[in-house]
């Protein structure tokens, strides 16, 4: 569509060698055993990412990534047949920076020759249950860009590789497909599913990962690895393993070559003529010599038997080379259309606890995503001065990397040790500190005022020193969404009477209430009126000036709330956690596993202390206190269609010796039967059915835990007439165990480790008490099913990208530009501006997304077109090149492997085309990734 | 004295670089911290030597030497400043054989450049308390020869390095000095001694290790390492350690360079301007990158502070380079003349149990030495057909290596795990199996008869299938000593009447007695007559033919036994072992540590079942049965000056929950006061005094264990008139706790580990019962002190080098040569033939030893001369070149560093010189090592 912009290769010696062309030769008449040397390097888990990188705190776990890469590079040089794959760019990037130029040249050569191959290649290997697609795409982009910048085409990962995550989301598969991956391998799936697949030879399949996108756009070849991600039993030659090395000195007592070879041949007995063997595991290859020396011998001695008629051929390989062989086989593969949740590794071992584990970290990660998007946008809109301006040096990279790390499958998942959880949070805070400078600089550019501004991080606990001490302050609001929203603001103040005006000097309705014994007051600002609405990518000012009060104005966009025509009972319950003393299984509830000790939850308190507060005519508020550690505030805003449920849980008492998992349950008269719906990574919605899996006959062994699914932004139940949708502020676990009921797990505090490695009970300490207090919001909407998406889609995006508030003492100076909008006009309702970030000096990356699924909205589930040249108010778009979703390949260069699959009975969606080079048409659920050449106007 | 024989260098590229010339530059105005990267690789301990080499059984201990050497060689190549020392040739040899030529070339280059330096260089790092000097010299020679053959002069170790052995023998220091070492470093010494030495700056000294040899022949510069053999606290960067790595990326949270550097500078505060820091420990450097990467940074950042005025200079170094700096300092060093036994690391932690631990292994090792010497001698005497003759391929190498491994400080010491002890024994048995073929071949050559012969390994338990089944058999006896001995033989037979004749057909007195309920009979052959004496290196035949009997002849050499004019009470006692429940200390008795739970031993039984058996007029035998598990036979042979005490102990009962340590105690009226005497590695004798150390004021905290010393071949007590000497058949612990009393620990069975790493209680299983039965002999002689050595010196050598018996069914064929002697004549009484072994095709190595100390014998403590050309009966000596004791350097090339020491008040011994090039004069305790060019006559 436009001239291609700079492709950012490090020039790596002579020309690019296609690494797939360098795949090792196989033998078509033999069983080819592809040994795939690999390491699985958690970007934080038992240790922090820094500790893992340097090999610090080895008393916790022996692991040092710097040494892994040192060692592997040394060993690869010893024999051109040897291969290695590397996965986590967060680590590789750090290592690369510390290498000499000569080492960098050697590594580049190894990459060009296919001896070192990057697989997956994101900043981390993301969790699939608790991540939001926005952050997943960002972290993949971050890693893939480093590889592309550094190694060019030979550094582009061909294969997605999620060998450890605890269940697999369909949206992840869709994202990988759109990023151009040729295939996907993983290690963990339900033990019943695995047994069936092994029996029916369905360990490898084609995953059709979207019901909206036109195949093969979201089709992904998917393989289940035979040994999880470990080597076959007895063949672990890492320094961390105790398996016998190959002892091939016949002078020695312990000569064992024959025995080992025989054992391997037994292990390698499979029906197809290619098999992949993962030779590695967690943080292995710190001393790669041990692995390679023994694998060299294994290959030598096993293949030597070919001369005696053996039909086994062992070779060093990579997942891409293995995949290439499968593709060449030209078979028809089974089709998969649902997902791989929940994951159970035994009858009473459902990994459904981590959907909710560490609710505060999960919220902080989600808020940080919002902040990062804001930071990215303001970096583009503010121009070069954003990074180096009146407030110093700021950047979005630190936050990008912190968010990249936080997507890891032991980060936002909540399955890390406590000290590591603190480290993730600290990184996000540091990231934000860097962004804050950038945002200050950018806002200074956009407003023309360099007056200092502060950000109040602790508004959720009503702390903001400036607003609490100043009699006259100004609030600046930035809306990172591509459309207007309204947003309630609550500020702690010291006075009791304030007047609030907007940028134009018009009064804004507000309400001051007495909340604290300290006599601090809170100034509520309900921006209901059109003049108070936050425009797209906009900056807007409000001024709070005591001693005026009651400046509330009715919103022009006021809508009468729909009558809640179903009866909804809000209940707070707890499950008591299994302590592992159960006769059926020793499994406890822990960071990963959810296992209640009975299927019926206990009600926290049948009666609540209830206080109905009508703050003003615009909001009704009911405070319910169920117990000293469970309360909620129910709010209904005038002009809003949703009911807000603000829950506060903790410190969860455990003095009775029982861990507890607290849920909120909504019981309605909706005739939902056994069905309910949950989103996948915040995008497409999957149908769930109690005690049922679409692809195999489930033997349900955990009636509660076995029916939990992750929700990232929403869940709903429905019948013909009504749909009750709950939009969440973070990832949580949810289920529907009764007709008309929807339950969401809010918080967990447990007393036992659950034997999956973390080695700690999930019992988060609080700041002032013995257990963490978590607070959050659920937004409930009730709609007819066929219009429900029209409500919950924008509601959820508003929850994800929240306005950023900043404050100044006094009134902005006279020359301050009080209003600014980055977009020329609001985006069409179906279009979400997923990404706007600076790429290089003169380029910006944008992602435009159709935020509706096919068929879910009569109004919006239609193709929609955006004109790129009419998008920004301050940027001229000089050129646009479409890229893969991961932004590491031109769209037109994408040439994925093709696979044959079973015929499907469902009608396949069709795509509309772009009407012109400058006009981008989005089909339902489509994301278009574009590199724009821009000039500041 | 003669043309030099082939010096056996592998030609290593261009010329030899003196590795000492390649020592790193130091800074004379600064404190120079010599970092010495090293690994301590036990030749067996918790795992067998093979398991350690390959890295097998890592579940027991993570250790794989093949990988250590792989990794270090890789890392040394990365930076010429990096250095490494390697110590244990048993491992290095094995690794070297598996390397490609190109790797071998690289390694040779590293050696030539001083970057890889061999230190110590014996086959193993020998134990010092329980080894015999003969085997120690052999194992050192084995290792040093490999290094010399492979690397030439640059491979010659300059420094002896016994960083782990648990106490240090003076004889070891003497051996090292005679081998040409410039210095000696060790890690362990008594904690009180160490505290004193640190205070008085006597951590480095000159050790005068012989009272007989003319200084500086046995002078050895000796240093105690500051941190044992470990790195300073906090600086262990091995994969097996958990210390923090240096994190020098300022972008990281955990940047710690400043803190680490400061900590190091604190640790490096010493008064001299050179200090050695051992950077390594047990089996470290399997992943050498971790060490070097962090040491590189340490050096970089510490030395960077010099620009800011720091006076600390850190460098990679080696013990020889450090030693060279000390020598250049030209200081006067304190003089040390006693030894470093016993070793205690705390008040109740005396490492005196291992002197006796595993008595059966200790005996088997000693017997194996005798067999190896026999094997070596017969390889020379039998010529080339010995190794490849009628009985197949035989060799002495296997036995040499098995013995080399057995000298390790966790082998014969008895401090290894049980499965490893079995492995050492198995190796010795395999070694003997190889030697047996050689011996068969050689005896076939020497006797002219290829008739098959058998060796009866189990005569000590009266098992020999041939003699038990045959009515007519012949016995062949080989005497490996350089002089005639008489030796009692006892054979199990089936008949009750036998006639015995010697090679000349003359009757030999014998005695058949009923010993077993099985009605097997035993034919006793007492070779008392001159015709029955075993000549030097001789082969002699006896024929046993039933049904004659009582063919006993009185020996011509009959001497009336001296009247035992002192009262000797033989008592068997036991100490009960401390179980660690003592209020003063939790220390238990274990494989290393001896700690009785009370200072008074318990008598096993006050009354013994005693049976006096007079077998014949030539032997009186008393059998005493103290308990079901302790008995002894006391024998007095006519014509012999010694009383034989054959003890049998075990299975030691432990059902009462108490470990037990069994001693035999000889209580006499000798007025020994607090003094007693013990030998050092079977050679020179040291005076011991109860509750006393010659070099510091002892605070005695363990009245029994703190007075135990190792004996290798003898101990004695004496007063003006009498000396009671006990000659042992193996290494044991001994003490004298009362005036006139001498006690020897025979056997130990314990119920607790003693926390020194072995992780097992020392409770050896028996073959048929729950505990090992041990049997052994003590020879007691009583003499006036000034003639005692004339008795105990030859008696002890006869115990060490025992005749080898072999058997044939029937009578040897007519053409069999029935007598042979390898020496032309008996050696002078003072001279012991320590070594006779094949070196190369036309060369043999011999060691001639003066076996008397200066002044201990009026008759023998004089210089004595041997004519090399008149030595052998079947070999012509064409040339002789004297070598260092380790046979890796020409004597004339030896040029050891010279050291100044305090003046000594003792008169220094003087040496007599050789009268002619062919005549070798031996001064008391001198060993002359000669490479002979020989031709078979």
Image (cartoon, coloured by chain):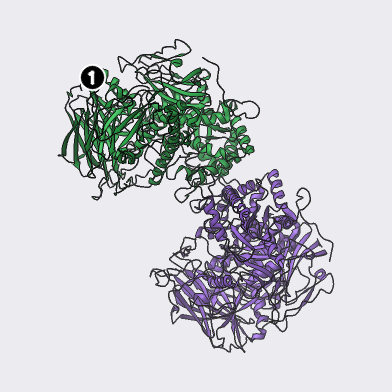
Chain colours: A purple, B green
- Tell me: residue A685, above or below residue A188: below
Query: Residue A881's spot in the image, x, y percent?
Result: 80, 64
Q: Is residue A936 visible?
A: yes
Q: Chain of mark 1?
A: B
Residue density around tag 1, few if under 14, some if 14–19, many if 20 or more, within 10 Å: some
Side of A415 where A139 appears, left or right? right
Residue sitting at the far front: B814
Query: Which of A156/A566 is in front?
Result: A156
Query: Residue A252's spot in the image, x, y percent?
Result: 50, 43
- Tell me: residue B621, above or below residue B748: above
- Tell me: residue A609, above or below residue B438: below
Query: Which of B535/A215 is in front?
Result: B535
Quarter of the view holding residue A377? bottom right
Residue at the disc numbered 1: B784
Which quadrant, please, contains the C terminus of chain A? bottom right
How many numbered marks are there?
A: 1
Query: Which of B172/B297 is in front?
Result: B172
Which quadrant, please, contains the N terminus of chain A? bottom right
Q: Is residue A440 visible?
A: no
Side of A255 where B789 appears, left or right? left
Query: Residue B160's spot in the image, x, y percent?
Result: 47, 29
Quarter of the view holding residue A565? bottom right
Name the residue located 78 percent from the left edge and 68 percent from the top edge: A872
Name the residue located 51 percent from the left edge and 58 percent from the top edge: A419
Side of A587 where A878 appears, left or right? right
Query: Residue B111's spot in the image, x, y percent?
Result: 59, 32
Query: Which of A56/B740 is in front?
Result: B740
Secondary structure of the residue carrying numbered label 1: loop
Name the residue located 58 percent from the left edge and 87 percent from the top edge: A564
Quarter of the view holding residue A434? bottom right
């Amino acid at each position: 569509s436009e001239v291609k912009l700079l492709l950012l290769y490090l020039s790596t010696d002579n020309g690019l060698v296609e690494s797939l062309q360098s795949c090792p030769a196989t033998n078509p008449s033999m069983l080819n055993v592809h040994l795939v040397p690999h390491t699985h390097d958690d970007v934080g888990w038992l240790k922090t990412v820094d500790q893992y990188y340097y090999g610090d705190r080895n008393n916790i776990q022996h692991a040092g990534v710097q040494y892994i890469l040192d060692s592997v590079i040394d060993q690869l040089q010893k024999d051109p047949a040897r291969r290695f794959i590397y996965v986590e760019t967060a680590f590789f990037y750090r290592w690369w920076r510390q290498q000499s130029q000569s080492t960098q040249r050697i590594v580049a050569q190894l990459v060009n020759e296919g001896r070192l191959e990057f697989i997956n290649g994101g900043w981390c290997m993301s969790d699939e249950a608790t991540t939001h697609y926005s952050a997943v795409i960002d972290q993949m982009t971050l890693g893939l860009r480093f590889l592309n910048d550094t190694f060019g085409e030979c550094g582009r990962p061909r294969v997605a590789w999620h060998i450890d995550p605890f269940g697999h989301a369909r949206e992840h598969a869709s994202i990988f497909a759109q990023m151009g991956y040729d295939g996907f391998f993983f290690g963990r799936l339900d033990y019943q599913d695995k047994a069936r697949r092994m029996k029916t030879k369905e360990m490898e399949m084609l995953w059709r990962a979207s019901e909206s996108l036109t195949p093969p756009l979201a089709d992904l070849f998917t393989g289940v690895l035979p040994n999880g991600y470990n080597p076959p039993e007895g063949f672990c030659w890492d320094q961390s393993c105790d398996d016998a090395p190959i002892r091939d000195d016949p002078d020695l007592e312990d000569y064992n070559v024959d025995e080992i070879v025989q054992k391997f041949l037994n292990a390698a007995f499979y029906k197809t003529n290619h098999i992949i063997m993962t030779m590695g595991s967690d943080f292995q290859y710190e001393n790669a010599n041990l692995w390679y020396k023994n694998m060299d011998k294994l290959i030598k001695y096993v293949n030597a038997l070919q001369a005696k008629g053996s039909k086994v051929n062992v070779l060093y390989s990579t997942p891409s080379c293995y995949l290439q062989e499968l593709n060449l086989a030209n078979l028809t593969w089974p089709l998969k259309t649902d997902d791989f949740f929940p994951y159970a590794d035994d009858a009473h071992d459902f990994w459904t606890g981590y959907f909710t584990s560490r609710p505060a970290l999960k919220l902080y990660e989600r808020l940080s995503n919002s902040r990062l998007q804001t930071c990215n946008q303001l970096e583009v809109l503010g121009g070069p001065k954003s990074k180096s301006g009146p407030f110093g040096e700021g950047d979005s990279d630190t936050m990008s990397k912190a968010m990249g790390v936080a997507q890891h499958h032991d980060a936002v998942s909540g399955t890390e040790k406590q000290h590591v959880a603190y480290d993730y949070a600290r990184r996000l805070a540091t990231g934000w500190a860097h962004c804050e400078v950038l945002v200050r600089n950018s806002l200074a550019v956009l407003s023309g005022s360099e007056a200092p501004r502060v950000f109040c991080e602790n508004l959720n606990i009503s702390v903001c020193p400036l607003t609490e001490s100043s009699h006259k302050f100004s609030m600046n609001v930035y809306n990172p969404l591509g459309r207007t929203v309204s947003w309630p603001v609550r500020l702690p103040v010291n006075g009791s009477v304030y007047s609030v005006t907007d940028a134009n000097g018009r009064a804004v309705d507000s309400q001051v209430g007495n909340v604290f014994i300290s006599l601090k007051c809170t100034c509520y600002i309900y921006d209901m009126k059109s003049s108070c609405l936050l425009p797209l990518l906009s900056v807007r000012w409000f001024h709070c000036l005591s001693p005026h009060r009651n400046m509330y104005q009715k919103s022009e966009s006021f809508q009468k709330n729909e009558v809640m025509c179903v009866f909804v009972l809000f209940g707070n319950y707890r499950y008591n956690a299994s302590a592992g003393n159960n006769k059926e299984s020793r499994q406890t509830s822990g960071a990963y596993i959810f296992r209640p000790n009975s299927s019926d939850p206990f009600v926290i308190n049948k009666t609540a202390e209830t206080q109905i507060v009508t703050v003003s005519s615009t909001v009704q508020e009911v405070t319910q206190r169920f117990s000293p550690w469970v309360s909620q505030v129910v709010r209904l805003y005038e002009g809003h269609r949703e009911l807000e449920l603000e829950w506060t849980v903790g410190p969860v008492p455990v003095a009775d010796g029982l861990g507890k998992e607290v849920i909120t349950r909504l019981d309605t008269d909706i005739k939902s039967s056994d069905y309910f719906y949950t989103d996948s990574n915040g995008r497409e919605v999957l149908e769930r059915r109690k005690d049922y899996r679409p692809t195999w006959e489930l033997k349900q062994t955990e009636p509660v835990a076995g029916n939990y699914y992750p929700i990232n932004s929403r869940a709903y139940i429905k019948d013909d007439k009504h749909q009750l949708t709950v939009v969440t502020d973070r990832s949580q676990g949810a289920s529907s165990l009764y007709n008309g009921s929807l339950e969401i797990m809010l918080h967990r505090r447990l007393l036992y480790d659950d034997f999956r490695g973390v080695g700690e009970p999930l019992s988060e300490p609080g700041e002032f008490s013995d257990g963490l207090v978590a607070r959050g919001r659920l937004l409930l909407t009730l709609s007819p099913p066929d219009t429900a998406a029209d409500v919950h889609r924008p509601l959820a995006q508003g929850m994800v990208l929240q306005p950023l508030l900043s404050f100044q003492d006094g009134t902005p100076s006279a020359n301050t530009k009080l209003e600014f909008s980055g977009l020329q006009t609001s985006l069409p309702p179906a279009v979400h501006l997923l990404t706007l970030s600076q790429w290089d000096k003169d380029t910006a990356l944008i992602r435009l997304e159709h935020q509706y699924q096919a068929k879910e909205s009569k109004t919006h589930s239609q193709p929609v077109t955006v004109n790129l040249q009419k998008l920004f108010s301050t940027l001229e778009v000089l050129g646009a090149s479409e890229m893969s979703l991961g932004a590491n390949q031109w769209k037109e260069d994408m040439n994925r492997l093709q696979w044959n699959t079973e015929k499907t009975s469902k009608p396949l969606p069709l795509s509309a085309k772009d009407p012109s080079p400058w006009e981008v048409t989005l089909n339902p659920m489509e994301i278009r990734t574009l590199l724009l050449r821009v000039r500041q106007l």
